[in-house]
Image (spheres, rainbow, N blue to C red):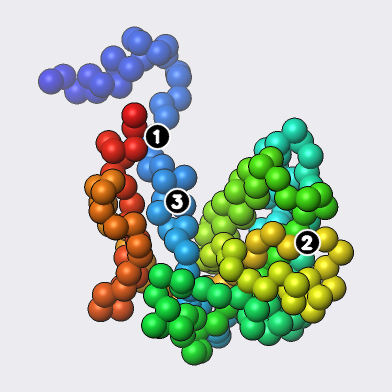
């Protein structure tokens, strides 16, 4: 093949002087792979309020059903109520024998998601969009997190002095777990499990998701 054939052919098709697009990986795919639900964290890393504010800021850019924008966020750090949140949440329901989080790996920063209106289908859609977007931002920042739905609503709202009902809590920190995705068929167990220190998360194969 003649020298510079590909370059010359590119210019014939797209025009001389046209900048070629460099082939790169897919950053969203990488973020999605890294965005795993961590139940254990490096307690030596203290998440700051500024970092939580950066994560919450994604909500100024994402969709909202009917553009209601009813979600509000309470930021909790190691120095501002983390203990109150920690004693009122439950994690790792599929692994009750482990009593997660393990001692010394507890999360110490949280984003408590509240709603200014009674929870309904549209607000739940907003919650899903917001929670996923915030966790992807956390991963982009080198952090990790988990969405927590099992918590004592009354105690959380009282101890944090929340003006609106809490509908979800995000724990944020520097993940201290090794998590792997494992493909499964639709009929196999979807329950996550741990083996030799690795947390495995079954995911249905894409060919079985498409109707």
- Is 10 situated left or right of 143 in this image? left
Q: Nearer the viewer, residue 27 or 133?
A: 133
**Mark carried by residue 165:** 2
Q: Is residue 183 above or below residue 9?
A: below
Mark 1–mark 2 distance (CA, rounded to whole Å): 48 Å
The residue sitting at the bottom extreme is 103
Dot in front, 1 or 2: 2
Dot in front, 3 or 1: 3
- Is 105 situated left or right of 50 in this image? left
Quadrant (top left/top right/bottom left/bottom right) for the C terminus: top left
**Mark carried by residue 22:** 1
Mark 3–mark 2 distance (CA, rounded to whole Å): 29 Å
Say whether disc 3 or disc 2 marks the residue closer to the N-terminus: 3
From the top left corner, tell me how far across and down residue 93 is, in percent. Answer: 46, 71
- The answer to whether residue 145 shows anywhere in this view is yes
Secondary structure of residue under mark 3? helix
- Residue at horizontal 85 percent and vertical 73 percent from the top: 161
- Residue at horizontal 25 percent and vertical 78 percent from the top: 196
């Amino acid at each position: 093949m003649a020298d510079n054939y590909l370059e010359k052919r590119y210019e014939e098709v797209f025009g001389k002087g046209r900048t070629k697009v460099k082939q790169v990986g897919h950053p969203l795919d990488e973020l999605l792979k890294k965005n795993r639900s961590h139940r254990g964290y490096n307690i030596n890393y203290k998440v700051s309020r500024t970092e939580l504010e950066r994560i919450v800021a994604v909500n100024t850019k994402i969709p909202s059903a009917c553009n209601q924008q009813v979600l509000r966020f309470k930021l909790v750090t190691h120095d501002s109520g983390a203990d109150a949140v920690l004693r009122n949440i439950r994690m790792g329901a599929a692994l009750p024998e482990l009593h997660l989080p393990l001692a010394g790996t507890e999360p110490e920063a949280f984003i408590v998601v509240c709603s200014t209106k009674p929870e309904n289908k549209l607000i739940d859609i907003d919650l899903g969009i917001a929670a996923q977007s915030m966790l992807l931002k956390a991963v982009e920042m080198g952090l990790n997190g988990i969405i927590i739905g099992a918590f004592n609503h009354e105690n959380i709202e009282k101890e944090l002095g929340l003006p609106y009902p809490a509908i979800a809590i995000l724990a944020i920190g520097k993940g201290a777990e090794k998590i792997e995705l494992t493909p499964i068929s639709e009929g196999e167990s979807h329950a996550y499990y741990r083996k030799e220190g690795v947390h495995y998360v079954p995911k249905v194969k894409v060919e079985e998701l498409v109707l």
